[in-house]
Image (cartoon, rainbow, N blue to C red):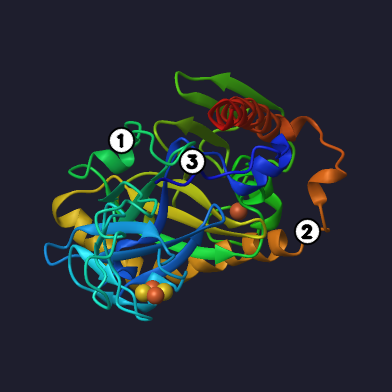
Amino acid sequence: MTTHTSSTAQTVEEYLEQGIRGIWYPVLASWEVSSNPVGITRLEQQIVLWRDQQGQIHALEDRCPHRGARLSMGWNLGDRIACWYHGVEVSGDGVVQDVPAVDRCPLVGQKCLRSYPAKEIHGAVFLYFGVTADEEPCELSFPQELANAEEYSNFLCTASWKCNYQYALENVMDPMHGTYLHSSSHSMAEGDRKADMTLEPTDSGFIFKKSDQMGVNFDWVEFASSGTYWMRLSIPYKKRFGPGGHFWIIGMVVPEDKDHCRVFFWRIRKVKDWQRDIWRFMYRNRLEQLHWDVLEQDRIVLENLAPNARGREYLYQHDVGLSRLRRMMQRTAQQQLATLNEVAQ
Ligand code: FES
Ligand SMILES: [Fe+2]
């Protein structure tokens, strides 16, 4: 018995508000999952995660098959989790392994819960959210600033925001806000306050950039889909902020529910050997707080947008990047809804 993830009567907008599927999402930082089971909501799905004795992460629907108690309130038994309410034990693949309160219970051996393929990589836990519950996960790859750990060094910063995830994505796809919202920050005070923007397709997405200013401020951003949706940007950094040229940011966003999301930003520099040590020391001691301050500015604006801000906008040329992303996501949502409709028939 498996569960499907959506009612098929949804509109494309409603589906998008919940989150695109068929991709991997970062759901938590690695350090947030220790031996106690953790309950989270992502794409409006309640999920329990825990680590077994080998450190391997398991992720299941957070709902005991017996009477619906939260498994995240239960006990970690390694490769399985035991419900707090009456002790039913379920393994990481969603199969009931034991019903200790009765003999020969027919529930034993049944797959009752959806399980989520999990990977731990670059300091985050990624789960695969299939369009349907039992589909095979797609490949997952990362841009070189994350994938090449020898040349680059990163810090992951993650935060929960009270806004739909689409606003958080679109905020990064809008480089021009750096010059205004972050004008007092240590890294985005320079450059022209007007710009023409251009869009350049790439193999896995597109680049949206200022036509005549590069390397001065937050001047460009790239969106790509490579098994997960990621955005990349770089900001020039003054010499006194340590070695390593530009400061790179890779950003990802996961929906929690319609009004909440979790953002993940990897802050990255191209540094190795002793330079890496210097940078990591400086980052922890002097730079991290500055970056949190910038992120707070984004959070405050987004959490206080007018209700249903997307429903009444006057977009201009600087919003071409986010419009492109919207169209792309709408197409994907349409295809995924069509798949769900087929499965339901
Ligand atoms: S509700 Fe979980 S064992 Fe009864
Ligand atoms: Fe910002």
Cα separation between marks 1 and 3: 13 Å
Quarter of the image where one finds residue 226? top left
Cα separation between marks 2 and 1: 34 Å
For the residue labelled by badge 2, is the local secondary structure a helix, a strand or a loop? Answer: loop
Check disc 3: other Cα within 10 Å, few if <14, some if 14-19, many if 20+: many
User: Left of 26 or right of it: where is 14?
Assistant: right
Q: Residue placed at 63% from the left, 25% from the top?
A: 331
Q: Earlier in the sequence, mark 3 or mark 2?
A: 3
Disc 3 and disc 2 in contact, CB within 8 angstroms: no
Up-down: is 175 above or below 303?
above
The reply to whether residue 263 is in sight is yes
Which residue is identified by label 1?
144
Q: Which mark is residue 219?
A: none
Amino acid on which the number 3 mark rests in the picture:
Leu
User: Left of 179 or right of it: where is 50?
Assistant: left
Which residue is identified by label 2?
305
User: Is ligand 2 less than 8 Å from the beta carbon at label 1?
Assistant: no
Amino acid on which the number 1 mark rests in the picture:
Gln
User: Is ligand 2 less than 8 Å from the beta carbon at label 2?
Assistant: no
Check disc 2: other Cα within 10 Å, few if <14, some if 14-19, many if 20+: few
Q: Earlier in the sequence, mark 1 or mark 3?
A: 1
Q: Which mark is residue 233?
A: 3
x, y percent for residue 268: 35, 50
Disc 1 and disc 3 in contact, CB within 8 angstroms: no
Cα separation between marks 3 and 2: 24 Å
User: Left of 133 or right of it: where is 52?
Assistant: left
The reply to whether residue 242 is in sight is no
Quarter of the image where one finds residue 158? bottom left
Amino acid on which the number 2 mark rests in the picture:
Leu
